[in-house]
Image: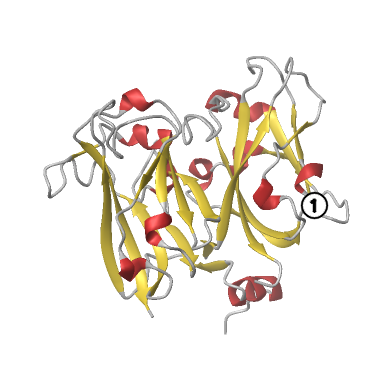
Amino acid sequence: MQLVSPLIQYMKDEGFIRDTCNPVCYSVTTAQINFSAAGTGLPTAIALNKPYYFQPYDELNHRNSTIMALEVVSTSFETTFLDGVNNVSSDDVFSNITLNLVNGVQDVIVQTPLSSLLGVAYGGYARKLYQVSLKDIVWSNCYIEITGNPLLLSAGQGVKFNIYYDKK
Amino acid sequence: MNNLVIKRSQLVEFQITGTPTTLRRYTARTVQNLSRNNIILYGIECYTEDQLAATPSGGAVIDTADASKVVLTLMDTNKDQFLYNAPIVSLIRENVGGFVTILKPRIINLSDCYIQLTDAAGIVTNESVVFNFYYDLIGE
């Protein structure tokens, strides 16, 4: 028999907490945002405080799935992606980028630096994968934003996410 | 063992305006998302410049070495200081094995929450201490 405090049970029932484990989900996919040279006028040109939107991906929209966990792909996992684009130069760069998850009426539901989405050891400490439970996001409204030093990024680099989700 | 599930989250900046001074209360910059007193806070995480190089509004984030000089007080809508002078070092995930600090869910009043400096040496004017508030909306 396992004793569980009423508070812990309440928070589990409300979906505030979950047992610590790797994500348990139906599907996993990836999403990538590539940067291009500054000054070209492209939507992916590197600039401070500019939103870089994800490509529309209907399967990740709230009507079709619930995102259960998110992870940014560490430079120690992949230095170059399948399309030939390079990952950022080091994991330290992720502290300069913020992720915003947005719903259908443009409310920012989740705002977090990418450094918090690293699933690997960072700064000598093990990091747990972020567990999210997002029921109403619209993927094409979601974006990342460079809030730190844009000079740490260059054309030909990109950021890639692993997205763990349950289909509806 | 349990870890936090993110329902909603929002970055909140506590900016150290003017000459950094001990005992002075530095309140949060207004966040429209959290301003209606309908926020149930159930988790909190602190960032220094190692995790967040600059705030979304362009401000500098406090140096990691200075984190041990800052304490946080959170107040709910009954003016209960349910988190009182908590060192922010223990709210940084790297320091606690990657876990997010989980709180008993409370309806908070953000404008009553504040940070204080226990030592102002090395703190720079207009630096911010940034927290990620994990919350839910009443009735959602």
Label 1: few (<14), some or many (≥20) within 10 Å?
some
Color theme of the render:
secondary structure
Residue at the far bottom: name it: A1
Task: Give percent across and percent down for residue A4.
Answer: 63, 76
Does residue A12 lie above or below B83 as drawn?
below
Q: Secondary structure at mark 1?
A: loop
Q: Is residue A2 left or right of residue A29?
A: right
Does residue B43 lie above or below A1 as drawn?
above
Task: Give percent across and percent down for residue A168.
Answer: 38, 80
> What amino acid is found at the position of numbered circle 1 in the picture?
Phe
- Chain that bears disc 1: B
Task: Give percent across and percent down for residue A19.
Answer: 49, 69
Q: Quadrant of the C terminus of chain B?
A: bottom right
Q: Quadrant of residue B130?
A: top right
Residue at (23, 34) in percent of width and height:
A36
- Closer-to-camera residue (A152/A49): A49
Q: Is residue A35 left or right of residue A9?
A: left
Residue at (74, 14) in percent of width and height:
B19
Does residue B96 lie above or below A36 as drawn?
below
Does residue A160 lie above or below B70 as drawn?
below
Residue at (36, 51) in percent of width and height:
A119
Task: Give percent across and percent down for residue B63.
Answer: 55, 24
Tally the marks: 1
Decide if residue A125 is in sight here.
no
- Closer-to-camera residue (A154/A51): A51
Residue at (70, 72) in percent of width and height:
B139
Q: Is residue A96 left or right of residue B81?
A: left
Decide if residue B134 is in sight here.
yes
What residue does disc 1 label?
Answer: B82
